[in-house]
Image (cartoon, helix red, strand yellow):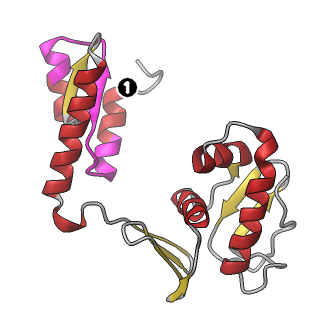
Amino acid sequence: MLGPSSGLDLVAELRSRSDIPIIVLTVRGSEDDKVRGLEAGADDYLVKPFGHRELVARIRAHLRRARTDGGQDADRVILRTGPLTLDVAQHAAEKEGRSLNLTATEFRLLHYLMDRASTVVPTGALLKDVWGYNDPSAREVLRVTLYRLRHKLEDDPSVPRLLHTVPGVGVMLKPESNEPAAESAVS
């Protein structure tokens, strides 16, 4: 009931890309619906209405199982974008094998941008998801952090090749290109 595609299509697509736990939350409660959902790749199927405590308990159970099934490296996520490597579990960042000394906030920002590499991330989303602010007046905090991060990532911060600002929209991290970004301030 998601429009042109179904929730089962989404489950199958997610399952083809990842082993993350998938819990279907739906109003469709027939045995056939449940079987189709589980066969599409869902790990669990919960019919509305349901108790929030039950949902939280099921989420915790699936996360516990995912951690133990995956062994020691289940929480290990290593992201790569161009010359950058980010090891989330070790809280380590490198550029071309050279360690980057990032603050906790710079690390969170870089992690967020690397998860969305080559995509313009709106300024409001950065403030909300990285800092937890829902206040557009907090843009100065983002601007200063981007300035510091750009100085740690770029060979020449005045000619950005990795961390690009799209004036009036947001920020994009993408593999190095030959074309410098037009501007290096957050709009």
Q: Which residue does the image show at 25% across and 51% down from the upper left?
A: 19
Is 154 displayed left or right of 48 in the figure? right
Of the 4 image quadrants, the one containing the N terminus is: top left
Q: Which residue does the image show at 70% across and 69% down from the upper left?
A: 163
Quadrant in the picture for residue 22: top left
Quadrant in the picture for residue 49: top left
Taking 87 as reference, is 74 above or below it? above
Taking 19 as reference, is 31 above or below it? above
x and y percentages locating residue 111 in the rendered image: 53, 62
Quadrant in the picture for residue 184: bottom right
Is 160 displayed left or right of 54 in the figure? right
x and y percentages locating residue 166 in the rendered image: 80, 57
Is 81 displayed left or right of 92 in the figure? right
Q: Nearer the viewer, residue 110 or 131?
A: 131
Q: Residue furthest front?
A: 103
Q: Tell me if mark 1 has few (under 14), some (14-19) or many (20+) residues whose alpha carbon lies within 10 angstroms of its own.
A: few
Element carrying mark 1: loop
Q: Which residue does the image show at 13% across and 56% down from the upper left?
A: 69
Q: Is any atom of residue 46 visible in this view?
A: yes
Q: Which residues are magenta?
A: 13-34
Is 87 displayed left or right of 55 in the figure? right
Q: Nearer the viewer, residue 79 or 104?
A: 104
Q: Nearer the viewer, residue 114 or 3?
A: 114
Taking 172 as reference, is 168 above or below it? above
User: Which residue carries the number 1 mark?
Assistant: 6
Q: Is any atom of residue 164 visible in this view?
A: no
Inspect the magenta stretch and tell me whether residue 69 lies in it.
no
Inspect the magenta stretch and tell me whether residue 18 lies in it.
yes
Tally of numbered tags: 1
x and y percentages locating residue 42 in the rendered image: 22, 35
Three-letter code for the amino acid on which mark 1 is drawn: Ser
